[in-house]
Amino acid sequence: MTARLKSIQSLLYRLITAPSGVAEGLALERSLPAGGLASMIRGDDRLSAEQRVDIYANMYFYRLLGVMNEDYPATAAVLEETNFHNLITGYLLAYPPAEPSVAGAGRYLADFLRAHPLRAEFPFVADLAALERATIEVFCAADAPILEASQMNKIPPDRWAAVKMRRVPATAILEVQWKVEEVLRAVEGKRRWIEPPRHEHRILVWRRNSRVNYREIAGGEAEALAVLRRTVSFGRVCEKLAQDLSDEAAAAEISRTLARWLADGILMRPAARPPEF
């Protein structure tokens, strides 16, 4: 690549991604050659060099806006077109994309919304965006061999407490203040959404057979899933599930919860350590 070509490419990138538009981006340039932008980009009677670059700048923004609409359909539905457009405009000024892929462009939208004026009208919208982001991250998370019920059944019951396990990578736990999962389900089902009630709780998000699921978790299950972020023994998991329960109730809770986790495919056994030489 020649030095001139590289210089032109760098200039075009700065102008196309300039937060305030091509005209203001040009005004900030201090090393334009004689003849300015027109010496590098050919204009004609219909469009000047600046107007031609402006077309690409608009395409850049609307491509990102389209990505945000795809990644945050419920947030977009709640805010509606004008509010969402203005939100994304401000967000991209605060968090300009820093990766070649557009996949990470909306990674910080929930954080941006937590201090945004739109929360005065839509106090639940940051939690909703956080849930939508979690579904994306979980969908894209690495695959892992899941722990099957048949594998557990091959282990003598008196050895279950020592079995090591953890959550698969395609899981996440969110702490939210609003019942935003109801809003997301309504939008996914193409139903009318209603403002969710305030309800401090945790949501489990997981992927099973390329489908992302989510549901509220509470009590011992929430505590057990939290420790399963790392590799722990099943005995440790049982301690969390059984807390504050009688022996009979604890046994039923452990059996019911383990069966659900195995059916949902959210557990894995850690890989065996390679032999040391």
Image: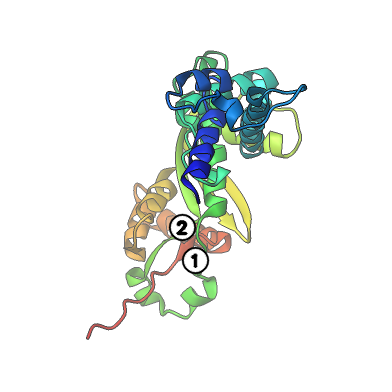
In the depicted view, which residue is nearer to us: 12 or 263?
Answer: 12
In the depicted view, which residue is nearer to us: 177 or 31?
Answer: 31
Outermost residue on the left side: it is 277
What residue is shown at x 36% (from left), y 58% (from top)? 237
Mark 2, residue position: 169
Quadrant in the rendering for residue 247: bottom left
Q: Could you tell me how far apart the alpha carbons at marks 2 and 1 are, in whole angstroms?
A: 7 Å
For residue 198, say whether it is visible.
Answer: no
Pointer 2 local density, CA inside 10 Å: few below 14, some 14–19, many at least 20: some
Residue type at mark 1 is Ala
Pointer 1 local density, CA inside 10 Å: few below 14, some 14–19, many at least 20: some
Mark 2 secondary-structure assignment: loop
Quadrant in the rendering for residue 81: top right
Q: Residue 3 placed where, x, y %? A: 46, 45
What residue is shown at x 62% (from left), y 39% (from top)? 71
Outermost residue on the bottom side: it is 277
Mark 1 secondary-structure assignment: loop
Q: Residue 266 placed where, x, y %? A: 50, 59
For residue 210, say whether it is visible.
Answer: yes
What residue is shown at x 54% (from left), y 30% (from top)? 17
Residue type at mark 2 is Pro
Q: Which numbered disc flags the more N-terminal residue, 2 or 1? A: 1
| Position of the C terminus by quadrant | bottom left
Q: In this view, does 162 lie above or below 218?
A: below
In the depicted view, which residue is nearer to us: 26 or 97?
Answer: 26
Q: Residue 144 carries which label?
A: 1
Q: Residue 72 placed where, x, y %? A: 61, 35
The reply to whether the C-beta atoms of the residues labelled 2 and 1 are less than 8 Å apart is yes
What residue is shown at x 63% (from left), y 18% (from top)? 83
Q: Is residue 54 above or below residue 7?
A: above
Q: Residue 223 placed where, x, y %? A: 38, 48
Q: Which mark is residue 31?
A: none
